[in-house]
Amino acid sequence: MPPDGVQPIPYRYLDPGVRELVRQLADHGFRPVDSGDGVSKCEHGRSLDFLHVFMVTEPCDLASEADRLEALLPALDREGVVVEATYRPSDGRGILGLLDLPTDGGTT
């Protein structure tokens, strides 16, 4: 197990529409901890209805990792998705979100 307590990624259990993206992000040094393709589990009510990948980082690296992720998007063929960065004081982690939000003006 990695020293920060993040488990290895069980790729075969990930939603098919996000599996390769999660693998690419991990290959670039990001630490994905939650993901979904927005369609595979929606009927069960357990998933966001848009593609998303959440990653953890050290709080002191949050802004630079968000910038690095944003710069990587064209190489991942993910231009137009949103990068968000959040600090969660309850557990001292930085959270990066890669979100393919709807562009139809609707809400999720």
Image (cartoon, rainbow, N blue to C red):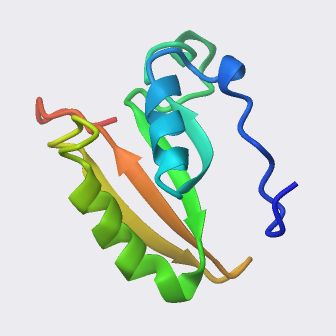
Residue 22, relative to residue 84: is it above or below?
Answer: above
Task: Residue at the far right: name it.
Answer: 1
Is 91 placed left or right of 78 in the picture?
A: right
Give the residue drawn at x 53%, y 58%. Answer: 29
Q: How many marks?
A: 0
Locate the N terminus and report the quarter of the image it occupies: bottom right
Task: Residue at the far left: name it.
Answer: 104
Residue 72, relative to residue 67: is it above or below?
Answer: above
State the image coordinates of residue 95 (x, y, percent, origin top left): 53, 66
**Of residues 84 and 26, the one drawn nearer to the viewer in this rendering:** 26
Residue 41, relative to residue 103: is it above or below?
Answer: above
Q: Quadrant of residue 107?
A: top left
State the image coordinates of residue 51 (x, y, percent, origin top left): 39, 31
Q: Quadrant of residue 34?
A: top right
Give the residue drawn at x 52%, y 46%. Answer: 27
Give the residue drawn at x 22%, y 33%. Answer: 102
Give the residue drawn at x 44%, y 18%. Answer: 17
Q: Quadrant of residue 79?
A: top left
State the image coordinates of residue 36 (x, y, percent, origin top left): 52, 29
Is 5 placed left or right of 9 in the picture?
A: right
Task: Residue at the far front: name it.
Answer: 27
Residue 97, relative to residue 102: is it above or below?
Answer: below
**Of residues 52 and 102, the one drawn nearer to the viewer in this rendering:** 52
State the image coordinates of residue 101 (x, y, percent, origin top left): 27, 39
